[in-house]
Amino acid sequence: MDRKSGTKNQSSRWRHAINESRRPAYIAIADAIADDIQSGHLTANQRLPTLRQLAEDLGLNFTTVARGYAEAQRRGLLDARPGHGTVVRETVGSGPLRRPVAPGNLIDMTMNMPPEPQDPALLARFAEGYASLGAQDAYSLLRYQEFGGTHEDREAGAQWLNLPGVGGQRVLVCPGVQAALLALFTVLARPGDAIACEAVTYPGIKGLAAQLGIRLVGLPADEQGLVPDAFGALCAADLPKALYLNPTLLNPTTATLPPARREAIAEIARRYGVPIVEDDAYARLPSQPLAAIATLAPELTFYVTGFSKCLGAGLRVAYLTTPNVRYTARLSAVLRTTSVMASPILNALATRWISDGTAELAAQAVRAESRARQRLAASILRRAEYVTDPDAFHLWLKPPAPWTRIEFATHLRAHGVGVVVSDTFTVSGAAPEAVRVCLGGAASRAECGHSLEMIEDAIEQLPALASRVM
Protein backbone atom coordinates (compact mmCIF):
# COMPACT_ATOMS: atom_id res chain seq x y z
CA MET A 1 0.00 0.00 0.00
CA ASP A 2 1.48 3.37 -0.95
CA ARG A 3 1.68 6.27 1.49
CA LYS A 4 -1.14 8.23 -0.13
CA SER A 5 -3.65 5.35 0.06
CA GLY A 6 -2.48 4.54 3.60
CA THR A 7 -3.17 8.12 4.69
CA LYS A 8 -6.59 7.96 3.03
CA ASN A 9 -7.49 4.75 4.88
CA GLN A 10 -6.22 6.24 8.13
CA SER A 11 -8.35 9.36 7.70
CA SER A 12 -11.35 7.19 6.88
CA ARG A 13 -10.86 5.16 10.08
CA TRP A 14 -10.48 8.29 12.15
CA ARG A 15 -13.50 9.98 10.57
CA HIS A 16 -15.61 6.92 11.39
CA ALA A 17 -14.28 6.81 14.96
CA ILE A 18 -15.04 10.50 15.48
CA ASN A 19 -18.55 10.15 14.12
CA GLU A 20 -19.24 7.15 16.37
CA SER A 21 -17.75 8.73 19.48
CA ARG A 22 -19.83 10.63 21.99
CA ARG A 23 -16.75 12.47 23.20
CA PRO A 24 -15.54 15.88 21.94
CA ALA A 25 -13.97 15.64 18.49
CA TYR A 26 -10.46 16.47 19.68
CA ILE A 27 -10.61 13.73 22.33
CA ALA A 28 -11.94 11.31 19.71
CA ILE A 29 -8.94 12.12 17.49
CA ALA A 30 -6.53 11.26 20.31
CA ASP A 31 -8.50 8.06 21.02
CA ALA A 32 -8.27 7.08 17.34
CA ILE A 33 -4.50 7.64 17.36
CA ALA A 34 -4.17 5.47 20.47
CA ASP A 35 -6.26 2.72 18.85
CA ASP A 36 -4.13 2.80 15.69
CA ILE A 37 -0.93 2.51 17.72
CA GLN A 38 -2.33 -0.45 19.64
CA SER A 39 -3.54 -2.19 16.50
CA GLY A 40 -0.29 -1.60 14.61
CA HIS A 41 -1.76 0.75 12.00
CA LEU A 42 0.68 3.37 13.34
CA THR A 43 4.27 2.47 14.13
CA ALA A 44 7.13 4.15 15.95
CA ASN A 45 8.52 7.28 14.23
CA GLN A 46 5.77 7.23 11.61
CA ARG A 47 4.96 10.73 10.48
CA LEU A 48 1.36 11.89 10.78
CA PRO A 49 -0.45 14.23 8.39
CA THR A 50 0.00 17.95 8.95
CA LEU A 51 -2.68 19.72 10.95
CA ARG A 52 -4.09 21.45 7.89
CA GLN A 53 -4.05 18.27 5.80
CA LEU A 54 -5.83 16.28 8.50
CA ALA A 55 -8.36 19.05 9.09
CA GLU A 56 -9.21 18.95 5.39
CA ASP A 57 -9.39 15.13 5.32
CA LEU A 58 -11.65 14.95 8.39
CA GLY A 59 -13.80 17.94 7.53
CA LEU A 60 -12.93 19.62 10.83
CA ASN A 61 -11.47 23.01 11.62
CA PHE A 62 -7.76 23.49 12.25
CA THR A 63 -8.20 24.26 15.97
CA THR A 64 -10.01 21.01 16.73
CA VAL A 65 -7.35 18.94 14.99
CA ALA A 66 -4.58 20.84 16.77
CA ARG A 67 -6.23 20.08 20.10
CA GLY A 68 -6.46 16.42 19.12
CA TYR A 69 -2.75 16.20 18.36
CA ALA A 70 -1.92 18.06 21.58
CA GLU A 71 -4.08 15.67 23.61
CA ALA A 72 -2.36 12.68 21.98
CA GLN A 73 0.99 14.22 22.80
CA ARG A 74 -0.08 14.81 26.40
CA ARG A 75 -0.82 11.07 26.67
CA GLY A 76 2.69 10.29 25.49
CA LEU A 77 1.68 9.00 22.04
CA LEU A 78 3.26 11.61 19.79
CA ASP A 79 6.27 13.86 19.49
CA ALA A 80 5.68 17.23 17.84
CA ARG A 81 8.66 19.24 16.68
CA PRO A 82 7.76 22.49 14.89
CA GLY A 83 9.38 22.43 11.47
CA HIS A 84 9.78 18.64 11.52
CA GLY A 85 6.19 17.45 11.74
CA THR A 86 4.39 15.18 14.19
CA VAL A 87 5.51 11.56 14.62
CA VAL A 88 4.55 8.55 16.70
CA ARG A 89 6.80 8.29 19.73
CA GLU A 90 9.41 5.59 19.62
CA THR A 91 8.28 4.35 23.03
CA VAL A 92 4.77 4.83 24.28
CA GLY A 93 5.08 2.92 27.53
CA SER A 94 4.77 -0.68 28.59
CA GLY A 95 1.14 -0.98 27.55
CA PRO A 96 -1.40 0.66 25.28
CA LEU A 97 -2.15 4.28 26.11
CA ARG A 98 -5.81 4.75 25.40
CA ARG A 99 -8.27 6.96 27.21
CA PRO A 100 -7.21 9.10 30.17
CA VAL A 101 -9.38 9.43 33.25
CA ALA A 102 -10.28 12.98 32.25
CA PRO A 103 -9.64 14.88 29.05
CA GLY A 104 -6.70 17.25 29.17
CA ASN A 105 -6.50 20.83 28.02
CA LEU A 106 -3.90 22.78 26.17
CA ILE A 107 -1.46 24.89 28.11
CA ASP A 108 -2.58 27.84 30.18
CA MET A 109 -0.93 30.97 28.80
CA THR A 110 -2.39 33.30 31.43
CA MET A 111 0.12 33.02 34.28
CA ASN A 112 3.39 34.79 33.55
CA MET A 113 5.68 32.01 34.69
CA PRO A 114 9.19 31.33 33.41
CA PRO A 115 9.65 28.27 31.22
CA GLU A 116 11.03 25.20 32.99
CA PRO A 117 14.22 24.06 31.22
CA GLN A 118 14.72 20.30 31.41
CA ASP A 119 18.52 20.37 31.50
CA PRO A 120 19.63 17.25 33.46
CA ALA A 121 22.61 19.02 35.05
CA LEU A 122 20.43 21.88 36.29
CA LEU A 123 17.76 19.49 37.62
CA ALA A 124 20.49 17.57 39.44
CA ARG A 125 21.66 20.77 41.10
CA PHE A 126 18.09 21.49 42.19
CA ALA A 127 17.90 18.00 43.72
CA GLU A 128 21.20 18.53 45.54
CA GLY A 129 19.88 21.79 46.95
CA TYR A 130 16.74 20.11 48.26
CA ALA A 131 18.80 17.29 49.75
CA SER A 132 21.13 19.75 51.49
CA LEU A 133 18.24 20.95 53.65
CA GLY A 134 18.04 17.50 55.19
CA ALA A 135 21.67 17.72 56.29
CA GLN A 136 20.95 20.78 58.44
CA ASP A 137 19.64 20.85 61.97
CA ALA A 138 15.93 20.39 61.34
CA TYR A 139 14.80 22.52 64.26
CA SER A 140 17.03 25.42 63.23
CA LEU A 141 14.83 25.78 60.16
CA LEU A 142 11.58 25.38 62.11
CA ARG A 143 12.16 28.08 64.72
CA TYR A 144 11.37 31.77 64.62
CA GLN A 145 14.35 33.62 63.21
CA GLU A 146 15.63 37.15 63.22
CA PHE A 147 13.36 39.20 60.97
CA GLY A 148 14.89 40.14 57.65
CA GLY A 149 16.97 37.00 57.40
CA THR A 150 20.17 35.71 58.95
CA HIS A 151 23.50 37.35 58.21
CA GLU A 152 24.19 34.68 55.57
CA ASP A 153 20.77 35.19 53.95
CA ARG A 154 21.25 38.96 53.76
CA GLU A 155 24.72 38.63 52.28
CA ALA A 156 23.38 36.23 49.65
CA GLY A 157 20.61 38.72 48.95
CA ALA A 158 23.12 41.50 48.42
CA GLN A 159 25.01 39.24 46.00
CA TRP A 160 21.79 38.57 44.07
CA LEU A 161 20.79 42.26 43.99
CA ASN A 162 24.20 43.15 42.57
CA LEU A 163 23.81 46.86 43.35
CA PRO A 164 27.06 48.81 43.85
CA GLY A 165 27.62 49.74 47.47
CA VAL A 166 24.74 47.63 48.81
CA GLY A 167 25.88 45.07 51.38
CA GLY A 168 23.95 42.59 53.44
CA GLN A 169 23.30 45.13 56.22
CA ARG A 170 21.06 47.06 53.81
CA VAL A 171 19.01 44.05 52.65
CA LEU A 172 15.72 42.76 54.03
CA VAL A 173 14.77 39.18 53.14
CA CYS A 174 11.02 39.10 52.44
CA PRO A 175 8.48 36.33 51.73
CA GLY A 176 8.11 37.23 48.06
CA VAL A 177 7.99 40.45 46.04
CA GLN A 178 4.25 40.93 46.59
CA ALA A 179 4.73 40.97 50.36
CA ALA A 180 7.48 43.55 49.97
CA LEU A 181 5.25 45.72 47.75
CA LEU A 182 2.44 45.54 50.30
CA ALA A 183 4.79 46.79 53.00
CA LEU A 184 6.14 49.55 50.75
CA PHE A 185 2.69 50.84 49.79
CA THR A 186 1.67 50.76 53.46
CA VAL A 187 4.66 52.84 54.52
CA LEU A 188 4.68 55.31 51.62
CA ALA A 189 0.98 56.20 51.32
CA ARG A 190 -2.23 56.43 53.31
CA PRO A 191 -5.81 55.82 52.15
CA GLY A 192 -6.73 58.41 49.53
CA ASP A 193 -3.12 59.20 48.61
CA ALA A 194 -1.85 58.76 45.05
CA ILE A 195 0.96 56.57 43.74
CA ALA A 196 2.00 57.03 40.11
CA CYS A 197 2.73 54.12 37.78
CA GLU A 198 2.57 53.12 34.12
CA ALA A 199 -0.97 53.38 32.71
CA VAL A 200 -0.67 49.71 31.71
CA THR A 201 1.30 47.85 34.33
CA TYR A 202 1.76 44.84 36.60
CA PRO A 203 -1.74 43.98 37.88
CA GLY A 204 -0.57 42.95 41.35
CA ILE A 205 -0.33 46.58 42.44
CA LYS A 206 -3.95 47.21 41.46
CA GLY A 207 -5.06 44.71 44.07
CA LEU A 208 -2.73 46.18 46.69
CA ALA A 209 -3.94 49.72 46.02
CA ALA A 210 -7.57 48.66 46.24
CA GLN A 211 -6.91 46.84 49.52
CA LEU A 212 -5.17 49.89 51.04
CA GLY A 213 -7.47 52.55 49.58
CA ILE A 214 -4.65 54.11 47.56
CA ARG A 215 -5.25 55.85 44.22
CA LEU A 216 -3.12 54.75 41.30
CA VAL A 217 -2.39 57.43 38.71
CA GLY A 218 -1.51 55.87 35.38
CA LEU A 219 1.08 57.70 33.29
CA PRO A 220 1.52 57.46 29.51
CA ALA A 221 4.05 54.95 28.21
CA ASP A 222 5.28 53.92 24.78
CA GLU A 223 7.46 51.16 23.35
CA GLN A 224 10.32 52.31 25.62
CA GLY A 225 8.25 52.43 28.77
CA LEU A 226 7.09 55.32 30.95
CA VAL A 227 7.38 58.80 29.41
CA PRO A 228 9.49 60.95 31.78
CA ASP A 229 7.80 64.23 30.79
CA ALA A 230 4.45 62.84 31.90
CA PHE A 231 5.94 62.01 35.30
CA GLY A 232 7.38 65.51 35.55
CA ALA A 233 4.04 67.11 34.64
CA LEU A 234 2.23 65.09 37.30
CA CYS A 235 4.77 66.05 39.96
CA ALA A 236 4.36 69.72 39.09
CA ALA A 237 0.55 69.55 39.22
CA ASP A 238 -0.30 66.97 41.91
CA LEU A 239 2.70 65.51 43.72
CA PRO A 240 2.29 61.73 44.17
CA LYS A 241 3.48 59.95 47.28
CA ALA A 242 5.65 57.61 45.19
CA LEU A 243 6.33 56.31 41.71
CA TYR A 244 6.01 52.58 41.07
CA LEU A 245 8.01 51.21 38.13
CA ASN A 246 8.47 47.82 36.48
CA PRO A 247 11.48 49.04 34.44
CA THR A 248 12.76 45.81 32.89
CA LEU A 249 10.58 43.76 30.51
CA LEU A 250 7.45 45.49 31.79
CA ASN A 251 4.62 43.10 32.52
CA PRO A 252 2.65 43.09 30.18
CA THR A 253 4.14 45.15 27.32
CA THR A 254 7.78 43.87 27.62
CA ALA A 255 9.09 47.46 27.40
CA THR A 256 12.47 48.14 29.03
CA LEU A 257 13.35 51.67 30.06
CA PRO A 258 16.52 52.75 28.20
CA PRO A 259 19.36 54.45 30.13
CA ALA A 260 18.36 57.99 29.13
CA ARG A 261 14.84 57.54 30.47
CA ARG A 262 16.10 56.00 33.68
CA GLU A 263 18.33 58.99 34.21
CA ALA A 264 15.50 61.43 33.40
CA ILE A 265 13.10 59.73 35.81
CA ALA A 266 15.74 59.69 38.55
CA GLU A 267 16.40 63.41 38.02
CA ILE A 268 12.68 64.30 38.20
CA ALA A 269 12.20 62.19 41.33
CA ARG A 270 15.18 63.91 42.93
CA ARG A 271 13.90 67.37 41.96
CA TYR A 272 10.50 66.79 43.60
CA GLY A 273 11.59 64.39 46.34
CA VAL A 274 9.34 61.56 45.14
CA PRO A 275 10.30 58.05 46.35
CA ILE A 276 10.63 55.36 43.66
CA VAL A 277 9.52 51.74 44.09
CA GLU A 278 11.63 49.82 41.56
CA ASP A 279 10.07 46.39 41.09
CA ASP A 280 12.79 44.68 39.05
CA ALA A 281 11.36 41.16 39.00
CA TYR A 282 12.78 40.46 35.53
CA ALA A 283 16.22 41.95 36.17
CA ARG A 284 18.13 38.69 35.68
CA LEU A 285 16.64 37.87 32.29
CA PRO A 286 18.19 40.41 29.87
CA SER A 287 21.45 39.27 28.32
CA GLN A 288 22.67 42.87 28.62
CA PRO A 289 21.19 44.24 31.87
CA LEU A 290 20.90 47.97 32.42
CA ALA A 291 21.89 49.92 35.52
CA ALA A 292 19.05 49.99 38.03
CA ILE A 293 17.40 53.29 38.88
CA ALA A 294 18.49 52.52 42.45
CA THR A 295 22.06 53.21 41.34
CA LEU A 296 21.03 56.61 39.90
CA ALA A 297 18.92 57.84 42.83
CA PRO A 298 19.84 55.60 45.79
CA GLU A 299 18.63 58.17 48.32
CA LEU A 300 15.05 57.83 46.97
CA THR A 301 14.74 54.30 45.59
CA PHE A 302 13.32 51.15 47.15
CA TYR A 303 14.61 48.27 45.04
CA VAL A 304 13.06 44.80 45.18
CA THR A 305 13.56 41.61 43.20
CA GLY A 306 13.20 37.88 43.75
CA PHE A 307 13.09 34.51 41.98
CA SER A 308 9.55 34.22 40.60
CA LYS A 309 10.46 35.33 37.07
CA CYS A 310 13.96 33.89 36.75
CA LEU A 311 13.68 30.56 38.55
CA GLY A 312 10.19 29.73 39.79
CA ALA A 313 7.27 31.26 41.69
CA GLY A 314 7.43 28.61 44.42
CA LEU A 315 10.68 30.07 45.78
CA ARG A 316 8.90 32.82 47.75
CA VAL A 317 12.00 34.80 48.66
CA ALA A 318 12.60 38.43 47.73
CA TYR A 319 15.29 40.95 48.58
CA LEU A 320 14.50 44.58 49.39
CA THR A 321 16.89 47.46 49.86
CA THR A 322 15.84 50.88 51.14
CA PRO A 323 17.26 54.43 50.94
CA ASN A 324 18.11 54.64 54.66
CA VAL A 325 17.96 52.86 58.01
CA ARG A 326 14.83 54.77 59.06
CA TYR A 327 12.85 53.24 56.22
CA THR A 328 14.43 49.85 56.89
CA ALA A 329 13.12 49.94 60.47
CA ARG A 330 9.61 51.02 59.40
CA LEU A 331 9.38 48.38 56.69
CA SER A 332 10.67 45.72 59.06
CA ALA A 333 7.87 46.54 61.48
CA VAL A 334 5.20 46.32 58.76
CA LEU A 335 6.57 43.09 57.31
CA ARG A 336 6.84 41.55 60.77
CA THR A 337 3.19 42.42 61.39
CA THR A 338 1.86 41.14 58.05
CA SER A 339 4.03 38.05 57.51
CA VAL A 340 6.08 37.45 60.72
CA MET A 341 9.12 36.36 58.69
CA ALA A 342 10.22 34.79 55.45
CA SER A 343 10.37 30.98 55.62
CA PRO A 344 13.78 29.90 56.99
CA ILE A 345 13.58 26.78 54.85
CA LEU A 346 13.15 28.75 51.62
CA ASN A 347 15.74 31.28 52.74
CA ALA A 348 18.28 28.51 53.27
CA LEU A 349 17.56 27.06 49.84
CA ALA A 350 17.83 30.44 48.13
CA THR A 351 21.09 31.21 49.95
CA ARG A 352 22.62 27.90 48.89
CA TRP A 353 21.59 28.32 45.26
CA ILE A 354 22.95 31.86 45.11
CA SER A 355 26.21 30.87 46.81
CA ASP A 356 26.92 27.80 44.67
CA GLY A 357 25.84 29.42 41.38
CA THR A 358 22.71 27.35 40.81
CA ALA A 359 20.43 30.41 40.80
CA GLU A 360 22.50 32.13 38.12
CA LEU A 361 22.64 28.96 36.01
CA ALA A 362 18.86 28.66 36.32
CA ALA A 363 18.41 32.26 35.16
CA GLN A 364 20.67 31.58 32.18
CA ALA A 365 18.69 28.45 31.32
CA VAL A 366 15.39 30.35 31.55
CA ARG A 367 16.83 33.05 29.30
CA ALA A 368 17.95 30.50 26.72
CA GLU A 369 14.59 28.71 26.74
CA SER A 370 12.74 32.04 26.54
CA ARG A 371 14.77 32.98 23.47
CA ALA A 372 13.98 29.62 21.87
CA ARG A 373 10.26 30.13 22.48
CA GLN A 374 10.42 33.66 21.12
CA ARG A 375 11.93 32.26 17.91
CA LEU A 376 9.15 29.66 17.85
CA ALA A 377 6.54 32.39 18.24
CA ALA A 378 8.09 34.40 15.42
CA SER A 379 7.98 31.35 13.13
CA ILE A 380 4.30 30.64 13.88
CA LEU A 381 2.69 34.05 14.47
CA ARG A 382 3.31 35.33 10.97
CA ARG A 383 0.06 37.28 10.70
CA ALA A 384 -0.04 38.50 14.27
CA GLU A 385 0.82 42.02 15.38
CA TYR A 386 2.63 41.86 18.67
CA VAL A 387 5.50 43.37 20.64
CA THR A 388 7.99 41.48 22.75
CA ASP A 389 11.65 41.19 23.66
CA PRO A 390 14.02 38.31 22.83
CA ASP A 391 14.70 37.74 26.54
CA ALA A 392 11.05 37.87 27.65
CA PHE A 393 8.78 34.86 28.07
CA HIS A 394 5.59 36.73 27.26
CA LEU A 395 4.33 38.90 24.42
CA TRP A 396 1.73 41.64 23.97
CA LEU A 397 -0.53 40.76 21.07
CA LYS A 398 -3.06 42.97 19.27
CA PRO A 399 -5.92 40.97 17.73
CA PRO A 400 -6.75 42.22 14.22
CA ALA A 401 -10.09 43.90 13.54
CA PRO A 402 -12.88 42.99 13.61
CA TRP A 403 -11.76 40.92 16.62
CA THR A 404 -12.05 42.69 19.96
CA ARG A 405 -9.77 41.67 22.79
CA ILE A 406 -12.71 40.15 24.70
CA GLU A 407 -14.01 38.15 21.71
CA PHE A 408 -10.52 36.96 20.87
CA ALA A 409 -9.72 35.82 24.41
CA THR A 410 -13.13 34.17 24.77
CA HIS A 411 -12.67 32.27 21.52
CA LEU A 412 -9.23 31.04 22.58
CA ARG A 413 -10.51 30.05 26.01
CA ALA A 414 -13.25 27.97 24.42
CA HIS A 415 -10.52 26.07 22.59
CA GLY A 416 -8.31 25.54 25.63
CA VAL A 417 -5.89 28.47 25.33
CA GLY A 418 -5.96 31.03 28.11
CA VAL A 419 -4.67 34.57 27.53
CA VAL A 420 -5.17 37.73 29.60
CA VAL A 421 -7.00 40.79 28.25
CA SER A 422 -5.52 44.26 28.65
CA ASP A 423 -8.22 45.36 31.12
CA THR A 424 -6.39 43.39 33.81
CA PHE A 425 -3.33 45.64 33.46
CA THR A 426 -4.97 49.01 32.73
CA VAL A 427 -4.83 51.59 35.51
CA SER A 428 -6.32 54.58 33.70
CA GLY A 429 -7.78 55.42 30.31
CA ALA A 430 -9.35 53.03 27.84
CA ALA A 431 -7.92 49.54 27.81
CA PRO A 432 -6.02 48.87 24.56
CA GLU A 433 -7.14 46.13 22.21
CA ALA A 434 -4.46 43.68 23.30
CA VAL A 435 -3.88 40.44 25.22
CA ARG A 436 -0.87 39.09 27.07
CA VAL A 437 0.37 35.67 26.01
CA CYS A 438 2.76 33.79 28.29
CA LEU A 439 5.17 31.38 26.62
CA GLY A 440 6.46 29.81 29.83
CA GLY A 441 5.16 27.61 32.60
CA ALA A 442 5.32 23.84 32.79
CA ALA A 443 4.32 23.31 29.18
CA SER A 444 6.90 21.88 26.80
CA ARG A 445 8.14 23.83 23.82
CA ALA A 446 6.05 21.63 21.53
CA GLU A 447 2.90 22.27 23.59
CA CYS A 448 3.65 25.97 23.47
CA GLY A 449 3.93 25.67 19.69
CA HIS A 450 0.53 23.97 19.44
CA SER A 451 -1.13 26.79 21.35
CA LEU A 452 0.61 29.41 19.26
CA GLU A 453 -0.70 27.66 16.14
CA MET A 454 -4.23 27.98 17.52
CA ILE A 455 -3.68 31.68 18.15
CA GLU A 456 -2.44 32.12 14.59
CA ASP A 457 -5.42 30.17 13.30
CA ALA A 458 -7.81 32.40 15.28
CA ILE A 459 -6.15 35.46 13.76
CA GLU A 460 -6.93 34.09 10.29
CA GLN A 461 -10.62 33.66 11.12
CA LEU A 462 -13.41 36.21 11.29
CA PRO A 463 -15.21 36.32 14.67
CA ALA A 464 -18.52 35.29 13.07
CA LEU A 465 -16.91 32.23 11.51
CA ALA A 466 -14.96 31.36 14.64
CA SER A 467 -18.12 31.33 16.73
CA ARG A 468 -19.54 28.49 14.64
CA VAL A 469 -16.57 26.14 14.63
CA MET A 470 -16.53 22.97 16.70
Image (cartoon, rainbow, N blue to C red):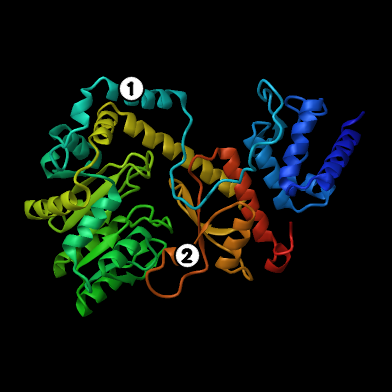
Mark 2, residue position:
422
Asked if residue 114 lies left or right of residue 219, the reply is right
The amino acid pointed to by label 2 is Ser
The amino acid pointed to by label 1 is Ala
Residue 86 on image: x %, y %: 70, 36
Picture quadrant where residue 31 is located:
top right
**Compared with residue 362, is residue 18 higher up or lower down, i.e. above or below?**
below
Question: Can I make out residue 293 in this image?
Answer: yes
Return the residue nearer the eye: 298 or 408: 408
Asked if residue 16 lies left or right of residue 237, the reply is right
Picture quadrant where residue 44 is located:
top right
Asked if residue 387 lies left or right of residue 304, the reply is right
Helix, strand or loop for disc 1: helix
Return the residue nearer the eye: 29 or 63: 29
**Compared with residue 75, is residue 188 higher up or lower down, i.e. above or below?**
below
**Compared with residue 250, is residue 94 higher up or lower down, i.e. above or below?**
above
**Compared with residue 58, is residue 42 higher up or lower down, i.e. above or below?**
above
Residue at point 60%, 46% (across, down): 106
